[in-house]
Amino acid sequence: MSDIAKKYVKALINSMNDKEIGTLSKGLDSMTGAFKNNKFLAIIHSPDVSRVQKEEFIRGLINTKDEKIINFIKLLISKDRLDEIPSIAHELQNRIALKNNTFHGVLISGKKVTKEKLKDIESVLSKKFDSAIKLENKVSDYNGMKVEIESLGVEIGLSTDRLKQQIAQTILNAI
């Protein structure tokens, strides 16, 4: 996370109420995917597109009439910091999560986990961290299960390969 994004988020939180922060967060979140699009990047980096045109373009994506949010977008454009939007959105989500004591994470597994098991894992983690934990299951080639909750700095994993190695080592040590 960039220090610039952290400074902007701190200023935003100090100058906006919760509703405005929520609106801004949703707007910025909706834009983060656009930063993976080459045409979008070409527009915001183009010297041929004026700052006013960039502002109108970005405002159209966020779809708000809130003056504070519009002024924030103008500030980012004037400082040539539109590229910071994904980092700002991410940091803003983290701050909102901390304030609401609600955290989102990912359960990575080799096969799909049932909704009931996912709820059970969420419940155990929620009790452990005294927070509301919401998990999304991502299926990958990982041989085991791993939970990552970035905003809490948590990574918990159980690899079946590692477990097999430890059992084999224990047996060899016993001989």
Image (spheres, rainbow, N blue to C red):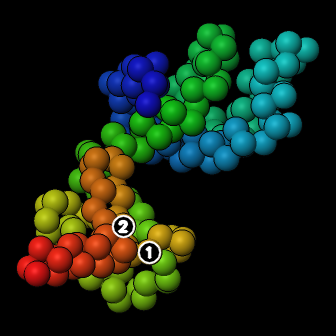
Side of 108 relative to 85 (left or right) = left
Q: Which residue lies at the image location 56% right of the left edge and 22% below the top edge?
A: 72
Quarter location, residue 104 = bottom left
Residue 144: image location, x then y, percent: 39, 75
Q: Is residue 57 above or below residue 94?
A: above
Outermost residue toward the left in this view? 174
Instruction: State the residue position of label 1.
Output: 143
Name which residue type carries label 2. Answer: Lys
**In the rendered view, does 48 fall on the left or right side of 28?**
right
Residue at 65% x, 42% y: name it: 31
Looking at the rendered image, the quarter that the N terminus falls into is: top left
Q: In this view, does 162 lie above or below 131?
A: below
Side of 44 relative to 138 (left or right): right
Relative side of 142 to 82, left or right: left
Q: Mark 2 points at which residue?
A: 146
Compared to residue 54, the image places residue 19 above or below, namely below
Image quadrant assignment for residue 105: bottom left
Look at the numbered disc 1 and give the secondary structure of its residue. Answer: loop
- Residue 19 seen in this snapshot: no
